[in-house]
Amino acid sequence: MPQSKRIEETAADASRNPQHILTQEYRRTRAVMEAVAAPLSDADATIQSMEDASPAKWHLAHTTWFWETFLLREHAPEYHLYDERWPFLFNSYYEAEGARISRFARGMLSRPLLEEILEWRRVVDAAMVPLIESGAHDDLIRLGIAHEQQHIELLLTDIKHALFQNPLGPRMWSEGPDVPAAQAAHSANTATPEPTQARELGWHTHPGGVALIGHDGPHFAFDNEGPRHRTLLEPFALADRLITNREWSEFIADGGYETASLWLSDGLAWVREQGITAPLYWRGEDHFTHAGWQPRNPDAPVTHISYYEADAFATWAAHHHKGARLPTEFEWEAIARGQDGADTPAAHDPAGGNQLDNQLAGAAAPTPPIPKGGRDLFGDCWQFTRSAYLPYPRFAPAAGAVGEYNGKFMSGQFVLKGASCATMRGHSRPSYRNFFYPHQRWQFTGLRLAKDI
Ligand SMILES: [Fe+2]
């Protein structure tokens, strides 16, 4: 056999090797987090704008602490902790891992320096690769990769909130390819009112019946996504696109934020106490993005809304769409799986839509995450459901410290489905359950209506 042929086959075998694939996924995820943080100075990466948000430097360190604590410390006998003082700084909420600094003190960590954290990442990566290649801890490694992918999205939403605090409106990236279109739409909008360019709402209908909900099978999922179980659905329909900025402006113009009858009691109290009059990051016809202040595209999906706002909008929208409301998580998942009657029999593509791409080191043009709009069920914005974040029947947290990952947060939060423009493509799936408190809106949160039929 010619030498070149043998090399090609060896490479092909390696690419099919499950451990090689897992190593590649580990490296890709670590590289994306560092590429996302690359435009930040040490000062940018250190500041913390609120208790809900963590500094970028802390995300880079905490994800590394996760590998060091749960993989290397436990399963690599020759590995020594990089700095024995650092677990106290970078443990997030794991009671089983002992004491840690308070959440709001994360922004006080001017030391270690960003460059020291990046060096720690290189040391941990060098130790992790042989552990991954050993094939002994695949499930925990997949959890670590999914964890780091979640923190990539949190890093992006947290730094956006931090930069927003600065009156200079600093930008991480220059304008993305979608911004000229937004500017064009804005120019048209300010000259003469244009007819709506977003499509009329269409609907995915479901005849009702027993739906199978939750993760099942050999692929990775978080513990909160299972067990698979049966849920009874009444006939319903789910909108085929998200609510747009233009529609949200109509809600505002119609007095939506001042009309008490549209709001949940807690929501109205929140609006009044906080003086809320628009989605987070709105200012006039502009909005704040990772590319600084930009004109809003009226036909792009609205984002950075709370559960309270989403619910009030759905109540208001019932004037236009009889029976409009927020979907349940079970309705959303049933449509995502393709259990949606005769009109769209195929399952929706979890890797479709506008998600985080092109952030790898060396990419020609990192793209600022901004919702764009489209026909996909996934992408652009996480979508509020009216379902409380609760355990599924027969749910049991994972064994060990990582059992603290999801189950202990099942109180007072709502489930969001889909994926956003800041979600790494391939990270989400129909059974994925994101969750936030009803007042929180610094994530890329949006709204897809449902209705009874
Ligand atoms: Fe974490």
Image (cartoon, rainbow, N blue to C red):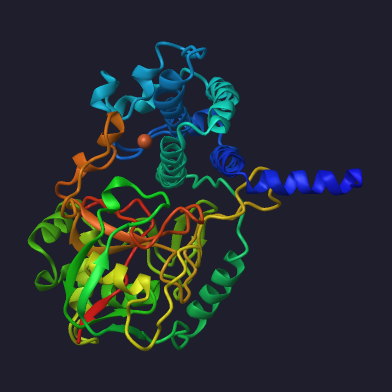
* Residue 374 vertical position relative to residue 287 in the rendered view, above or below: below
Q: Is residue 254 visible?
A: yes
Question: Residue 74: percent from the left, percent from the top?
Answer: 40, 20
Q: Residue at x 44, y 74 (%)?
A: 298
Q: Residue at x 23, y 25 (%)?
A: 95
* Residue 246 vertical position relative to residue 273 in the rendered view, above or below: below
Question: Residue 270: percent from the left, percent from the top?
Answer: 16, 54
* Residue 116 vertical position relative to residue 207 in the rendered view, above or below: above
Dividing the picture into quadrants, the one containing residue 383 is: bottom left
Question: Residue 356: percent from the left, percent from the top?
Answer: 52, 55
- Tell me the quadrant of ligand 1: top left
**Looking at the image, which is closer to me, 45 or 363?**
363
Residue lying furthest right: 2
Specify whether 32 is left or right of 437. Answer: right
Image quarter in which the C terminus is found: bottom left
Count the numbered circles shown.
0
Q: Is residue 325 visible?
A: no
Q: Residue at x 43, y 44 (%)?
A: 146
* Residue 103 vertical position relative to residue 182 in the rendered view, above or below: above
Question: Residue 67: percent from the left, percent from the top?
Answer: 45, 28
**Looking at the image, which is closer to me, 196 or 69?**
69
**Looking at the image, which is closer to me, 355 or 199?**
355
Specify whether 7 is left or right of 141. Answer: right
Residue lying furthest front: 1
